[in-house]
Amino acid sequence: MDITRSRSATAAQVRSLSPSLKVLSQGGSVSFQIERTAPHCSAVVEYDSPAWLNRLQFESSLHVLADIAWSDDGVHFFRVHGVRHESRGDTREFYFPLTVAKFLQVHFYQEGGPVHASELRNFQTKFHSQVQLKASSESDRLWTAANLVDRREDYGWASVIREKNEPEEVQLDFGGLYFIDGVQMKAVADELNYFPSAFQIQLSEDGNLWQTLHSEDHFFTASACWNAWSFNPTRARWVKIAINKSAHYKKGEYQSKILDIAVSGVAARWIQNDQQAPASLRMASENVPGAVLLAGNGIAAPSRVIQSDDSRLRNASTEYRGIMQFARDNEVSQEKAVQANDSRLKAATTLAPGIVQLAKNGEVRAGAAVQADDTRLARTSTEAPGIVQLANDRESRSGVAVQGSDSRLKGASTDAAGIVTLAQDGEVAAGKAVQANDSRLRLATQAWPGIVLLAQAGEIASAKAVAADDPRLIEADESHKGRVQLARHGEVIEKRAVQANDPRLATATEENRGIVQFSRNGVATPGQAVQATDSRLTDARRPLAHAHEEYAKTIHEFSQHTGNLQVKRSGKTALPEGFNAIADINIPLVIENTEGVAASFNGGSVHAAETTASFHVSQTDSAIQAASRDKAAATLVSANAYALHLPRSALGVKSSEKALHAEGRVLVEGAVTIQGAQSVVVSLPRASNEAFVEGDLLTIENGVAAKMRQDAQVCVGVFTKTAGLSLESANATVRAAVSGIVSLRVFGQVKAGDRLVLNSGQPGTCRVAQGQEKIVAIALEAVQQDREKPVMSILVR
């Protein structure tokens, strides 16, 4: 029986031996039903052929245990001793020595009383190998010791290539004791198979004391061939292949390779029934006299006795361990051992010497002694504390500590350096130092004083101070800007600046001189001065209604007109139908041309007014058209509001709700704020037979939008009729919100912050999540109703 590989044992028939135990078979799986309380329940498992077994397992919610017996004929059963039990959750596992049986009898019981009604699920018996392999060296990650039991033909184990012959070994640990009677090894399928030429097959119970069963020298084997060694069954847990000589095909290259290893074991009962074993020989134990095995010198192993010439029985010395005589209390004698009750072994205190317990690294505890390798006893550094050497007065040297009497630790003064007391925030006191977080050291602003950054010569920058040598601080004159001295009231002196409260800057009146505001051309307003270019200062003449042939040539200077100028080609001047009249009864210039453009300017046109500076009205086309070859066709700036306002109505006309139409790329340097719906919407194709309601969860089926019905489907969005940002498609008809805040159809009571998932009972709707489910949104409001209702929620991706 190869004990390096696990194998299952399939039952041919399972019979109950107890009225309260019922066998349940489902395909290849066997289960039992304990239908009522009983002292114990038994069953028999029959196999097609004798099966190798060392493990039994089943699942049970109750702590049900099993006792096992084997039989070759189904009539006489022998109990299996050494059963070990382990439980993990509902799984019960039973390990026992290697057994071969045609029939297996299992008794189910509970400790401390009868076995109660329960179900025993997934009943299995098998041989379970726990072999672990390791080697002294491995060639690479492909040729490892773990490959030796996989029965593959491509890779096995290979040692590293060495320049000279060195010992190698491979160990197999089976995790428990077996009676091992043979080892097989397979050579690599290569002409140069690198099979070791000299090795020993060794077995051990404890991994320390090894017994050599076979030894080979000058060994040769054919490639891809199994080689076998058999011996009397020997009890062991470890098997070792100790290699003395590796294969040597090239100069300076020594290497060993093995493709597979198989280890055979026999059942423990076969050893007990072996007629060749002496009937009178039995091994000694703690309670039973019998034969013993002698231990080698210095070897400590179970069931071995120490020989009289063992080096451990010699007198102990400072160089060797051994036996010795005890000393009396407080006795100081060579070659005597202190007894455990010796007063010198009492715990040390601050008053009396004694033994101490060593402290852990960095531990601070009374009664514990610091160890010599404690990191606190290492040299101190900038990264870790430790012991230091004291420096001399005013000595500056790395790695030494300043003493408390060092003159540098005296108080600092204006004459000598020293230590200082830190001042409170904003405190002004002699002998104290300002702290780095003092509010006076923050950057100065217009609201509070502080430190400043000096500006470059002539630099104009916020939060920077002008340096003393800045050229702007020179005296100002007619050629350069600079500093000036203020003049007294009414004082007239060169290079003096008039102050803002100088009476000469008061508003001019009929009694006093002062400053004035100019009036517009032709406008008569008290307190305003007429400008030199005012038309009223030209030769006065009485304005007359006239035709050009009576008064001047058809093309003439219009500045000669002193009144309003009206130019007409036909009929009455009016706005297009449907527009409100512009509320201004004093329009100096009205030009009307019903057959084309009313005015043409070759050059700039300036429009200025206290309110709206320019009105543009069109009946059938764009009211304003602008074009530029190299720069922006229009530049709009507002000092305190939006530079462009597109209202819903103006001049009596209601907006079409289509505010902005851009063909081409749009560049925004700054932020875009959208008020209203708070979602991003895309357009999806829809099936002709699908109807949607606001808040439906959507998925994609066969390339079109559909209501989400199953958790396995992917939620692509939520059906909505409103959008903050809409990404339209010409052929799509379903508007789906893919991110942002939307209204969802939710069943049941909802609290703000609840996680929402698909309600599979009603396609397209949601409910509150109960566990680890796929979340589609988070509720933003609380609703107490149990029926379906809209709930504002934020989509989760």
Image (cartoon, rainbow, N blue to C red):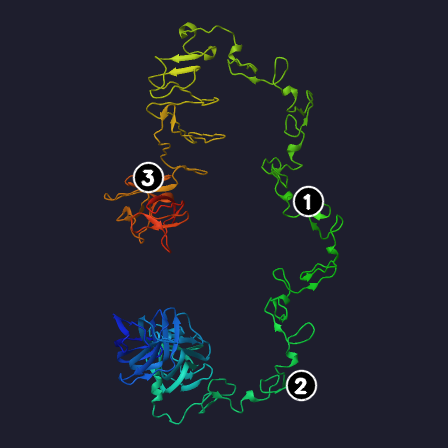
Say the numbered circle drawn on residue 721.
3
Q: Is residue 683 left or right of residue 637?
A: left
Q: Where does label 2 land, which residue? A: 333
The disc, 3 or 2, on the residue closer to the chain's N-terminal end is 2
> In the image as oriented, which residue stretches furthest toward the left?
689
Amino acid type at circle 1 is Glu
Say the numbered circle drawn on residue 641.
none
Residue 543 x %, y %: 46, 7
Residue 549 x %, y %: 40, 6
Q: Secondary structure at mark 2?
A: loop
Residue 275 x %, y %: 34, 92
Q: Where does label 1 land, which residue? A: 427
Density class for disc 3 (Cα within 10 Å; few <14, some 14-19, many ≥20) is: few
Q: Nearer the viewer, residue 481 or 341?
A: 341
Q: Quadrant of residue 355?
A: bottom right
Residue 490 x %, y %: 68, 20
Amino acid type at circle 3 is Lys
Marks 1 & 2, CB-CB < 8 Å contact: no
Question: Does any portion of residue 568 appear in the rendered image?
Answer: yes
Q: Secondary structure at mark 1?
A: loop
Q: Is residue 702 left or right of residue 772?
A: left
Marks 3 & 2, CB-CB < 8 Å contact: no
Density class for disc 1 (Cα within 10 Å; few <14, some 14-19, many ≥20) is: few
